[in-house]
Image (tube, helix red, strand yellow):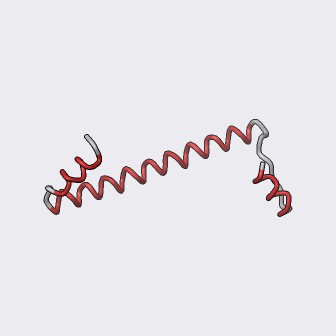
Amino acid sequence: MSLNDVVETIKTLSFEEKQEIQALLAQYLREERREKIYANYQQSRLEEQRSELKFSSNLNELKQLLEE
């Protein structure tokens, strides 16, 4: 089913059904974002354990680290 088919099907739903779809989409987006945040957290912990993270309070050094 294409996105266009989904959109056209949604147009035919009642107001309440559209609201339910809206709520479900918001929930799914929150869950996906949480999963992404958690994956980034896990990656950061792994990098920290491998001593791959670099820290600095020097602004020029931080800029240089970002360019790497």
The quadrant the N terminus occupies is top left
> Is 14 situated above or below 28?
below
Residue toward you, 12 or 33: 12
At x 77% / y 52%, what residue is drawn? 67
For residue 5, side relative to residue 35 (left or right): left
For residue 29, side relative to residue 59 (left or right): left
Residue toward you, 66 or 8: 8
For residue 13, side relative to residue 37 (left or right): left
**Residue 18 location, quadrant:** bottom left
At x 28% / y 58%, what residue is drawn? 22
Q: Position of residue 58 (x, y in %)?
A: 86, 62
Q: Residue furthest top?
A: 50
At x 30% / y 53%, what residue is drawn? 24
> Is 14 situated above or below 6?
below
Q: Position of residue 50 (x, y in %)?
A: 76, 36
Q: Position of residue 19 (x, y in %)?
A: 23, 61
**Residue 57 location, quadrant:** bottom right
For residue 38, side relative to residue 23 (left or right): right
